[in-house]
Image (tube, helix red, strand yellow):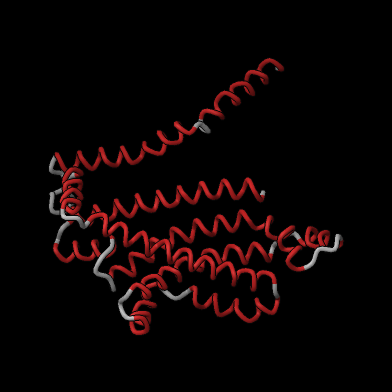
């Protein structure tokens, strides 16, 4: 019995580190995309799906090469990335401020929480006409719309975490003479850092979603505009190209945020 248990534990120790290796994570993450790409190539090469509905993968690559040669591809990528970064940063900073007000103050919760809950239910496209009327179709309207999308994941996650910080820890801090900022920095902030990071990652994903909403209606450049323009012209290859680029940009920016997350968690947790 003892030898069998020891062997089982030894096998678990051998298997567990394998899935923690970086190269295993990379290879494992590529399995599903490769299967999708293989199936895509199969159905297009065998004629199961007509090209006007689903062009071959290489056709999509050729569409990207064409836009690159015309000097347009990276302009679309750069302008969309700029809008997302600005909107994400602005929305997240404002959200953290309101999270502190609502999560740390009963008066703040009474004053702001009901209004923010109501605003969170407003669909993203409902803001577009109002923002265009106020800010025209310039960059301000797009960045503000993306900021609205980034605001609510951070606000909801962090405010809820602040409200549920272990009260025993707070009382222990107060018993040691900690008040306000020192209490927040020493007790409450470390307790909610994981929630802050989770909220930021959700906000980044939401920012990319709101980017498409902004660029579909009020833009002349960007990946969302490329989607809309390709739809009007019937260029399915460019539609798929824009979707792939949005997926790649979302993955890259999320990976950068994951690196920041690791550094922050090492510092505070």
In front: 166, or 180?
A: 180
Relative to residue 173, is residue 140 drawn left or right?
A: left
Q: Which image quadrant is residue 164 in?
A: bottom right
Q: Is residue 33 left or right of residue 189?
A: left
Residue 235: x and y, percent?
15, 58
Task: Work out whether 10 lies above or below 130.
Answer: above
Query: x and y percent of residue 60 in the render?
Result: 19, 48
Q: Residue furthest top?
A: 3
User: Where, by quadrant of the figure, is residue 10 drawn?
Assistant: top right
Q: Considering the image in quadrants, where does the N terminus appear?
A: top right
Residue at (58, 67) in percent of width and height: 96
In the displayed structure, would residue 115 be above or below residue 19? below
Tell me the residue at 70%/74% (across/down): 105
Q: Position of residue 210 (x, y in %)?
A: 38, 66
Outermost residue toward the bottom in this view: 133
Q: Nearer the viewer, residue 31 or 179?
A: 179
Tell how many labels: 0
């Amino acid at each position: 019995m003892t030898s069998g248990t020891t062997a089982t534990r030894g096998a678990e120790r051998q298997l567990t580190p394998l899935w923690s290796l970086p190269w295993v994570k990379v290879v494992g993450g590529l399995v599903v995309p490769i299967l999708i790409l293989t199936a895509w190539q199969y159905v297009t090469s065998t004629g199961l799906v007509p090209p006007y509905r689903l062009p071959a993968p290489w056709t999509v690559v050729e569409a990207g090469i064409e836009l690159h040669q015309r000097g347009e591809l990276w302009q679309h990528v750069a302008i969309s990335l700029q809008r997302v970064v600005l909107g994400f940063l602005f929305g997240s900073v404002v959200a953290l401020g309101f999270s502190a007000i609502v999560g740390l103050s009963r008066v703040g919760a009474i004053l702001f929480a009901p209004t923010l809950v109501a605003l969170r239910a407003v669909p993203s496209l409902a803001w577009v006409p109002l923002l265009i009327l106020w800010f025209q179709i310039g960059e301000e309207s797009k960045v503000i719309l993306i900021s609205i999308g980034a605001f609510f994941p951070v606000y909801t996650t962090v405010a809820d975490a602040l409200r549920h910080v272990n009260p025993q820890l707070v009382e222990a801090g107060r018993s040691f003479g900690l008040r306000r900022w020192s209490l927040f920095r020493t007790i409450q902030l470390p307790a909610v850092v994981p929630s802050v990071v989770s909220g930021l990652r959700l906000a980044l994903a939401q920012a990319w979603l709101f980017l498409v909403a902004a660029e579909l209606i009020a833009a002349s450049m960007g990946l969302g505009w490329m989607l809309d323009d390709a739809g009007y012209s019937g260029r399915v290859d460019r539609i798929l190209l824009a979707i792939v680029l949005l997926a790649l940009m979302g993955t890259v920016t999320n990976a950068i945020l994951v690196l920041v997350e690791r550094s922050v968690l090492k510092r505070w947790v």
